[in-house]
Image (cartoon, helix red, strand yellow):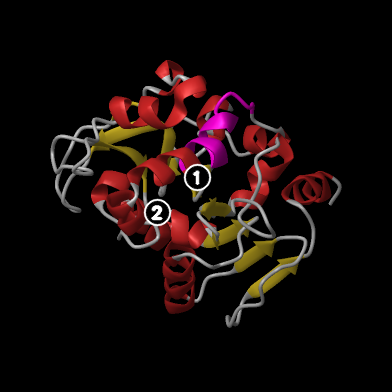
């Protein structure tokens, strides 16, 4: 049996990285509060790059030195697609995982979606936190005109108003879904397109699905089993059965 694991923010929560659920990630611009779904957009990057980069830095980049937890190590030799951009699966030793939403330690040129561009190391260690706004704008080559195509830099992250491309590994991910004989969803609320895509394929192939989450989202599928627990509890459960 070929089991494919698809993980979300719940898996990294035990490593001290906040999820999008609850109040985590809210950002204030002027007198208005913005949700992560409003901040993590290409539109925000284009229209207000300083606030976008500051939010991204505080919300993700400050956690870049956190280490993997027991679940990441358990997944290290398994077939894996993760929605997380923290890179912890790689730190745990999984050399072939697909980070379908990008990586916090990487960046690209700001480009038209779908173009083939190089993925480079992000310059986070050069950021001057005492002069954060100016430092970020300079490092990402953003002038007073705003982001310029093929000149400015952009964090390697798939934003809410962008679409999956092969730059993020969507072709490989779809092949893994079609080749799988079982799919296990861990720590995800099914609120992003990749989980819906995988679920559609599971329904089409009529293969078993497991949903692992303390508050699991109920899905329409004839072969689904729910594990209302954390990912860590799930792997402990597996050891004892």
| Magenta run includes residue 107 | no
Whether residue 101 is situated above or below residue 220 in the rendered picture = above
Q: Residue at x 58, y 69 (%)?
A: 208
Whether residue 30 is situated above or below residue 109 in the rendered picture = below
Residue 67, x across and y down, in percent: 64, 26
Considering every residue shown, the one lying at the far right of the view is 240
User: To which residue does mark 2 refer?
Assistant: 176
On residue 233, which mark appears? none
Residue 46 in view, yes or no: yes
Q: Residue at x 50, y 76 (%)?
A: 206
Residue 7 in view, yes or no: no
In this picture, which residue range is highlighted in magenta? 56-67
Q: Nearer the viewer, residue 57 or 2?
A: 57
Whether residue 57 is situated above or below residue 199 in the rendered picture = above
Whether residue 145 is situated above or below residue 228 in the rendered picture = above
SS category of the residue bearing label 2? helix
Callout 1 crowding tier (Cα within 10 Å): few <14, some 14–19, many ≥20: some
Residue 154, x across and y down, in percent: 30, 39
Q: Residue at x 46, y 39 (%)?
A: 54
Q: Nearer the viewer, residue 138 or 77?
A: 138
Would you say the residues marked 1 and 2 are in contact, meaning their CB atoms lie under 8 Å apart?
A: yes
Asked if residue 34 lies left or right of residue 200, the reply is right
Among numbered discs 1 and 2, the one appearing first in the sequence:
1
Asked if residue 162 lies left or right of residue 20, the reply is left
Asked if residue 174 lies left or right of residue 82, the reply is left
Q: Quadrant of the N terminus?
A: bottom right
Considering every residue shown, the one lying at the far top of the view is 126
Residue 218, x across and y down, in percent: 66, 77
| Magenta run includes residue 61 | yes
Q: CA distance from mark 1 to mark 2?
A: 8 Å
User: To which residue does mark 1 refer?
Assistant: 79
């Amino acid at each position: 049996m070929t089991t494919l694991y698809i993980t979300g923010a719940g898996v990294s929560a035990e490593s001290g990285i906040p999820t999008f659920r609850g109040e985590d990630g809210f950002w204030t611009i002027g007198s208005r509060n913005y949700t992560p779904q409003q901040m993590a957009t290409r539109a925000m990057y284009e229209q207000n790059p300083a606030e976008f980069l500051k939010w991204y830095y505080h919300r993700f980049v400050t956690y870049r030195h956190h280490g993997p937890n027991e679940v990441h190590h358990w997944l290290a030799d398994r077939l894996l697609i993760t929605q997380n951009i923290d890179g912890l699966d790689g730190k745990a030793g999984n050399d072939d995982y697909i980070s379908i939403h990008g990586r916090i330690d990487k960046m690209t040129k700001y480009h038209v979606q779908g173009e083939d561009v190089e993925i480079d190391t992000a310059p986070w260690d050069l950021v001057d936190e005492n002069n954060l706004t100016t430092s970020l704008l300079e490092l990402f080559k953003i002038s007073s005109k705003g982001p310029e195509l093929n000149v400015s830099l952009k964090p390697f992250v798939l934003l809410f108003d962008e679409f999956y491309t092969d730059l993020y590994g969507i072709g490989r991910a779809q092949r893994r879904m079609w080749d799988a004989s079982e799919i296990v969803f861990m720590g995800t609320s099914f609120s992003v397109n990749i989980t819906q895509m995988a679920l559609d394929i599971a329904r089409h192939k009529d293969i078993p699905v497991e949903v692992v989450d303390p508050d699991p989202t109920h899905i329409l599928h004839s072969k689904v089993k729910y594990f209302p627990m954390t990912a860590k509890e799930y792997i402990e459960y597996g050891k004892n059965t």
